[in-house]
Amino acid sequence: MSETLEPTSLPAEQPKMTRHTYRSVDPRTKSPFLAAFLSLIPGLGQVYVGYYQRGFTHPIVVGLVIGMLIVAGDQSRPPFYFPLGIIFLIFFWLYNIIDAWRRAIHYNLALEGLENIPLPNEMGSPTFAGSMFGGAAFFLIGFVILLHTRFGLPLEVLEEWWPVVPMAFGGYLFYMGWRDKHSK
């Protein structure tokens, strides 16, 4: 006996609908890899992302530390801060690379509206307007140079008195912290 099979009624297969999401690439996005790579030269990655003041501050810090290490290394016996300066320089250089990477990521997230951080003004030029510290530093440097060129003050005096500058800045930071703590 042969049995005939009747076709069973199977539901017709529905064509699978694929949902494509098209993301338009914002031309303002920044590559985190490129930002980190550019930061091998301190501050260049931050400038690429648009953080100009930070980008111009980093090479100044690196230059000052390298200058301090060169002067300290010329002595017959380097001072105690020489190894600390080298450790700081290595740490700061790595921090600079990681900072550029993270700023590029946060910048891109802010462009997509996922992060609530202010974007830098890319078209603006670097400005030091309103910087009390920067103004005071330039005034002090100009004043010392004027004393040397106009009144003949020997600059060797600075070799003995330079620690007053970081002490004054530390005192200022301490006072500002104390004032903020007690104003709440």
Image (tube, grey):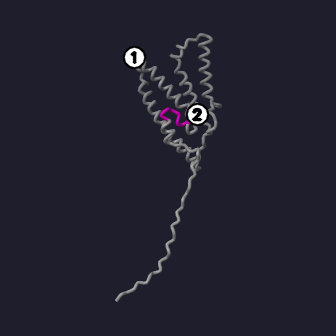
Position of 42 relative to 79 (above/below):
below
Sequence order check: which comes first, mark 2 or mark 1?
2
For mark 2, what is the residue?
53
SS category of the residue bearing label 2: helix
**Percent position of residue 179, x then y:** 60, 34
**Percent position of residue 100, x then y:** 51, 39
As drawn, the label of residue 76 is 1
- In the rendered structure, does residue 41 fall within the stretch colored magenta? yes
**Percent position of residue 183, x then y:** 62, 37
Position of 115 relative to 10 (above/below):
above
Name the one closer to the observer, 133 or 44.
44
- Residue type (three-letter) at the residue carrying disc 2: Gln
Q: CA distance from mark 2 to mark 1?
A: 38 Å
Q: Which residues are magenta?
A: 39-47
Q: Residue placed farthest to the bottom in the image?
A: 1
Q: Residue at x 39, y 16 (%)?
A: 76
Q: Can residue 30 be seen from the camera position used here?
A: yes
- Which of the 4 quarters of the picture holds residue 124? top right
Q: Which of the two marks, 2 or 1, is nearer to us in this view?
A: 2
SS category of the residue bearing label 1: loop
Q: Residues within 10 Å of mark 2 (few under 14, many from 20)?
A: some
Name the one closer to the observer, 100 or 65.
100
Residues at marks 2 and 1 touching, judged by CB atoms closer than 8 Å: no
Q: Quadrant of the C terminus?
A: top right
Name the one closer to the observer, 107 or 170.
107
- Residue type (three-letter) at the residue carrying disc 1: Ser
